[in-house]
Image (tube, helix red, strand yellow):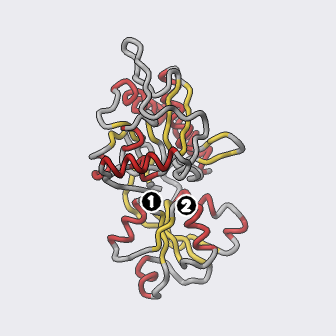
């Protein structure tokens, strides 16, 4: 994910692995459906000129919870920046959005959409060439950046400091943050999701973690975290998030998503949504 702000994830999966991953998800190992989950492979016949959908009347979105402020649960409802962006596209299509929680690796590989789990994927997902081999992406909707979070007093201000002090580094599995630090020569401890990554830092399993900047800033709004931990560096990775679609995307859905993003940026709606979730205007985050 981006928080280019910088972001999460990337993977090529063979058919057997894909089937296994989807089987795991269906059993609950990879997340839960936040609403009624569509049957595997199901899709509705489109009306003349209309989109082909997993569930009639719904724009079904795959995501990976929680990833606050992009998508997370507030009571029984899933909310967040990504949710509001996809809602704009759903409205254009005359649909309501339905959200399915599933493993990020299955999303970024394209397997979730190929198997008919969802129509689109919005999961703070950075657009990469590797992912584009398996997924079609919308126009970018978020500029992301990575960040380092560490215990106060660590004295770290860069990845070079982490290396020089021989500190233990943690990262979320399948993310671009993980890819970035690996390219920098690190072999970080990998955590399955962002809450487990934060817990790893809090429990002393690692000394520093890399995560999308907006996620780190959201964590630091919580007094119990801000009291002991601090943002020590921003890593400008030049990432951008995109809404993912099945390879060879339905042109009606793709156009609706692209138009929704483009129009929202032009008419001020995007800025309103951005300020709602980040408390700052685009370009002011980090």
- Residue 125 is at least partly visible in this image: yes
Instruction: State the residue position of label 1.
Output: 145
Image spot of residue 139 (x, y percent) = 37, 39
Image spot of residue 214 (x, y percent) = 54, 57
Count residues near mark 1 (Cα–Cα under 10 Å), then give few for <14, some for 14-19, many for 20+.
many
Which label sits on residue 36? none
- Examine the image and state in which quarter residue 154 appears: bottom right
Instruction: State the residue position of label 2.
Output: 194
Q: CA distance from mark 2 to mark 1?
A: 16 Å
Asked whether the residues under the numbered discs 2 and 1 touch, taking CB atoms below 8 Å apart as contact, a structural biologist would say no
The residue sitting at 37% across, 65% down in the picture is: 179
The mark lying in front, picked from 2 and 1, is: 2
| Helix, strand or loop status at disc 2 | helix
Earlier residue among tags 2 and 1: 1
- Examine the image and state in which quarter residue 239 appears: bottom left
The residue sitting at 59% across, 33% down in the picture is: 36
Image spot of residue 110 (x, y percent) = 36, 44
């Amino acid at each position: 994910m981006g928080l280019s702000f910088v972001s999460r994830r990337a993977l090529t999966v063979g058919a057997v692995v894909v089937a296994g991953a989807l089987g795991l998800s269906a059993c609950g190992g990879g997340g839960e459906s936040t609403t009624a989950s569509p049957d595997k492979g199901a899709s509705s016949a489109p009306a003349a000129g209309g989109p082909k959908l997993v569930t009639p009347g719904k724009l079904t979105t795959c995501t990976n919870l929680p990833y606050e402020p992009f998508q997370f649960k507030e009571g029984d409802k899933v909310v967040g920046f990504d949710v509001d962006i996809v809602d704009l596209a759903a409205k254009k299509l005359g649909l309501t959005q339905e959200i399915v929680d599933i493993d990020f690796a299955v999303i970024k590989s394209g397997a979730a959409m190929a198997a008919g789990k969802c129509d689109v994927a919005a999961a703070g997902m950075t657009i990469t060439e590797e992912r584009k081999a398996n997924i079609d992406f919308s126009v970018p909707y978020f500029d992301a950046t990575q960040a380092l979070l560490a215990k106060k007093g660590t004295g770290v201000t860069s990845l070079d400091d982490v290396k020089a002090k021989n500190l233990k580094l943690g990262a979320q599995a399948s993310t671009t943050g993980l890819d970035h630090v690996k390219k920098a020569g690190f072999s970080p401890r990998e955590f399955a999701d962002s809450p487990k990554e934060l817990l790893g830092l809090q429990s002393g399993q690692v000394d520093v973690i890399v995560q999308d900047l907006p996620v780190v800033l959201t964590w630091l709004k919580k007094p119990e975290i801000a009291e002991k931990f601090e943002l020590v560096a921003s890593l400008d990775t030049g990432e951008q998030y995109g809404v993912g679609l099945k390879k060879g995307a339905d042109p009606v859905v793709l156009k609706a998503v692209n138009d929704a993003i483009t129009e929202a940026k032009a008419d001020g709606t995007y800025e309103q949504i951005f300020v709602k979730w980040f408390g700052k205007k685009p370009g002011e985050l980090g």
